[in-house]
Image (cartoon, coloured by chain):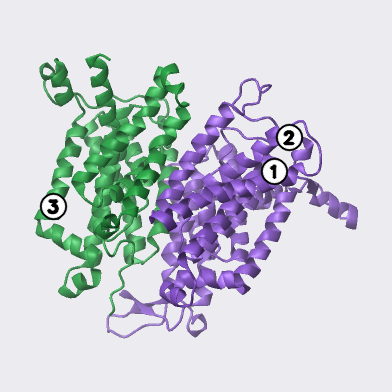
Chain colours: A green, B purple
Amino acid sequence: MSIDYLIAVMITVVGASTPILFAGLGELVTEKSGVLNLGVEGMMLMGAIAAFATVDQTGSPWLAVCTAAAAGALVALIFAVLTLSLSANQVATGLALTIFGTGLSTLIGQGFTGRAIHTFDTIFPPALATNPIGRVLFGYSPLVYFSFIMVALVAWFLRGTRAGLILRAVGENDLSAHSIGYSVVGVRYAAVLFGGAMAGIGGATFPLVLTPLWAEGLTGGRGWIAIALVVFAGWRPVWLLGGAYFFGLLTTFELYAKASGASWSSVLPSEAWAALPYIATVVVLAAISASKRAGGNAPACLGRPFIPSA
Amino acid sequence: MKFRLEKRPEPSRLMLYATPVGAVILTMVVGAIIFSAIGYNGVGAVYQEFLAPVLTPYKWQDIAIKASPLILIGVGLAAGNRAAIWNIGAEGQYVVGALAGAGIGLLTQNATGPWILPAMLLAGIIGGAVWGAIPALLRTRFNVNETLSSLMMTYVAIHLMNYLVAGPWKDPSGFSFPQTPLVTSDQTLPSWDIFQLLHQAFGLAITGHFRLHLGVVLTLVIVLVMAVVMGRSVFGFQIRVVGAAPNAARHGGFSQQQTIWLVFLLSGALAGLAGIFEVTGPFGQMSLGFPQNYGFTAIIVAFLGRLNPIGVIIAGIVLAITYVGGDMAQSALQLPNASKGIFQAMMLFFLLASDILIRYRVRLVTPAGGLAAEPVTPAKSAA
């Protein structure tokens, strides 16, 4: 196995991991505030089509990241109004959001099928990426570096800032937070919108980093894996990073099974490799959930509507 | 001018049944506006999506055939949602039920006999129940969130189907299309043309066809049985108590674990049966295009039908209309088929948004501080 092959594998794994890392980070913050948003898949698809359309129209991938975040946040706003202002059931509303995002992204994306876009140029001087080590360090899309920055920022925010403390308090005990005078609904709105923006950027990673083409439903269930990832990580951002790369690695097996034909598919058919991340998610969730610690990490108010006893 | 929410002394039954109707109407109005805004013929889209199928008698059989799986899956999901147990993997249970039945079909390609079709249907029920048992086992044994696991199993089911249909189960005489052989006559659900029967029986001068297969009839029978079970049996009571008051249920001796198993086996079995009905009825085989999102749309059906078996029938017909209307809008207006998903999601959004009207009434607060007449809910009759 040549070093070039290994580097190519690494770059593929990083690309596959980045979308679920972004979406998982957003969902983690949302859930820390006590809200379970199952609409991640729909928000990712909205981000993906917004990013694709923006690059197609303006040629600017940087602007595309912004519109993807805005699109994700905008559909998350629907979820927020329903669940936070109107106390609608969070599970059902999240599902509706996924169905909505899938439909709307397909409708908008119809005109873009078959078109290719030009995405990010490398941000580092090409000279840095000439040798193998340089390529592994400096050869990625800017979005990949941004995802690492966001992990650090979210970890710092939740643990080291006053606002993060308030957000966690709202998720752990909404009535107490309310009685001290914090706006439970306001904090949760912010957390849901942040989750939407991050899911949107996660979706944008597909056209901007993975394949510069539009295909309907291109996220293929990654949004659901991102939600599982949050449980896997026990609501801890740094663990989420590890989990995202583990599941990212699993999702690349299908590509290799398809590309290299005989050697991989003699072991298992490519469909089995494609199903592997989902089976692994269930198995890992079973292993994690069976141990008592994981359940203890879940925000106490997760999924419960906030009804102040006025 | 400000609105204020005021808690009702008890939930409004009027609102419980009026809000689904309101949600559908609002979807049509807002849908027309949205589709106009993004450059389509919005009014035309709503007409094709919701009204044209109803106004075109020869589309009625399509509506009935598409409503059947939605209702059958929806009635099972409604039971689960009543117990606050979330099976969102009905699509996977539907596919595995279809695969299990189609597997029996492959084994009996050269056999004849009246036992073959019942055997396929039974395999479908078992296949769906087995796939539903996986999230139930994971939840009861390992405490895995059933929402995530049931959905993950849906992806596994679809990859399994893709493998079988394009691989070992591919029709050898199918020009290498990824599809299983067509079902034989002994593997096909019997069907009847209702219009023809009416014509023969009463001499009614109806033209056209309204052909329904046995699956549609059985679906109606099952839903009526479910209505009795949910309303009058201990099982129905158990489901409602576990969902509404988990602590009371525990004191009353109802095990939550047992309820989870019952709900998943039941909803899985019904989804599996819906799947094999499609194989032995409208599809006649399995192919890559077999999954029609019925399992996901049935979630909307369950909610729009207010988790009530009779409501599920009505909601199933409404959603089936959007399926047929989606196809009509595609050919009449070149509207992408995905647009039906937008309408379907909007119905659920509006329904969930209006749920608050069941427990609260909206009051207009005048600047003087007093309460004006209620602008939204009718006066006492609503309470």
Q: At 24% from the left edge and 37% from the top edge, which residue is drawn?
A: A65
In the rendered image, which residue does mark 1 sit on? B120
Proximity of marks 2 and 3: CB atoms separated by less than 8 Å: no
Residue A180 x %, y %: 15, 73
Give the SS element for disc 1. helix
Give the SS element for disc 2. loop
Tell me which chain the residue with mark 2 is part of: B
Residue A20 x %, y %: 30, 40
Tell me which chain the residue with mark 1 is part of: B
Give the SS element for disc 3. helix
Mark 1 and mark 3: span between their CA atoms? 57 Å
Q: Closer to the camera: disc 1 or disc 3?
A: 1
- Is B254 left or right of A161, judged from the image as shown? right
Proximity of marks 1 and 2: CB atoms separated by less than 8 Å: yes
In the rendered image, which residue does mark 3 sit on? A157
Proximity of marks 1 and 3: CB atoms separated by less than 8 Å: no
Q: Residues within 10 Å of mark 2 (few under 14, many from 20)?
A: some
Q: Is residue B203 visible?
A: no
Vertical comparison of B265 with B186: above or below? below
Give, as a three-letter code, the residue at label 3: Phe
Q: Which mark is residue B108?
A: 2
